[in-house]
Image (cartoon, grey):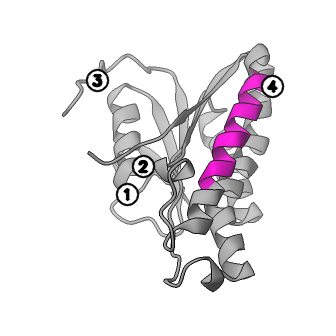
């Protein structure tokens, strides 16, 4: 199903899409562009860039990567009106919860929770200062329906992202910043 975009719907909006180089993230970037927004995104390695998108090579699982992307967004676009956090994924080994080492847990939390938290901390204050903005966190159906023995740490990290999102939505709503989650599911 394709939804036609009004090419002026998002004219003048500055958008950061984390995880915007493939899959759902790439589709998100394309939709914002089709609506007339200026878009910036990041990846560890930029492959198949979309014309008209500003890219930053950065590892968002590190504080330094988030700082580099936030600084580039503020410098290149002059601010961000919409934050769309599509970053996520999992590389869990087989073997259930007992196979999950501390390093695996930390890796899953860094990718699926902390990358988003760090960028929010860096960019939401400028939204508040300007009077508002919108933040979208992409979670997963596994945040409420985890798959046993295969995605425990991923599901827990995405559940934490849901809770974090709800918490900051209550804090930031009165300050003009709307926070929502999107929980995609296969059909």
Q: Nearer the viewer, residue 113 or 80?
A: 113
Residue furthest left in the image: 1
Task: Report which residue position mark 2 lands on.
Answer: 25
User: Disc 3 vs disc 1: Cβ atoms closer than 8 Å?
Assistant: no
x, y (%) of residue 186? 31, 48
Label 2 close to label 4 by CB (< 8 Å): no
Name the image quarter holding the N terminus.
top left
Residues shaded magenta: 158-172
Q: Nearer the viewer, mark 2 or mark 4?
A: 4
Q: Position of residue 141 (x, y in %)?
A: 47, 48
Where disc 3 sits, the SS reads: loop
Q: Is residue 176 visible?
A: yes
Please tell me which residue lies in front, 4 or 110.
110
How far across and how far down the image is residue 160, in percent? 69, 50
Query: Could you tell me how far apart the alpha carbons at marks 1 and 4 are, in whole angstroms?
Result: 32 Å
Mark 1 or 4, nearer chain start? 1
Residue positioned 64% across, 83% down in the render: 98
Tell me the number on the disc at residue 5.
3
SS of the residue under disc 2? helix
Tell me if I can see residue 58 in this picture. Answer: no
Considering depth in this image, is 22 or 10 the residue closer to the camera?
Answer: 22
Q: Circle 4 sits on which residue?
A: 171
Query: Pointers 1 and 2 in contact (CB under 8 A)?
Result: yes
Check whether the beta carbons of the residues at disc 4 and disc 3 lie within 8 A of each other: no
| Image-quadrant location for residue 48 | bottom left
Residue topped by disc 1 = 22
């Amino acid at each position: 199903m394709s939804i036609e975009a009004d090419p002026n719907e998002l004219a003048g909006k500055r958008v950061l899409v984390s995880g915007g180089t493939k899959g759902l993230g790439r589709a998100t970037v394309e939709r914002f562009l089709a609506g007339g927004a200026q878009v910036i995104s990041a990846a560890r390695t930029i492959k198949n860039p979309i014309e008209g998108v500003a890219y930053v090579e950065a590892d968002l699982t590190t504080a330094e990567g988030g700082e580099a992307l936030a600084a580039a967004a503020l410098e290149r676009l002059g601010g961000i009106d919409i934050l769309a956090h599509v970053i996520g994924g999992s590389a869990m080994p087989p073997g259930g919860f007992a196979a999950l080492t501390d390093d695996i847990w930390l890796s899953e939390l860094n990718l699926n929770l902390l990358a988003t938290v760090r960028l929010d901390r860096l960019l939401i204050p400028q939204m508040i200062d300007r009077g508002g903005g919108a933040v979208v966190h992409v979670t997963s159906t596994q945040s409420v329906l985890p798959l046993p023995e295969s995605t425990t740490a991923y599901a827990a990290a995405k559940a934490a992202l849901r809770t974090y999102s709800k918490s900051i939505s209550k804090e930031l709503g009165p300050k003009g910043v709307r926070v929502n989650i999107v929980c995609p599911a296969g059909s």
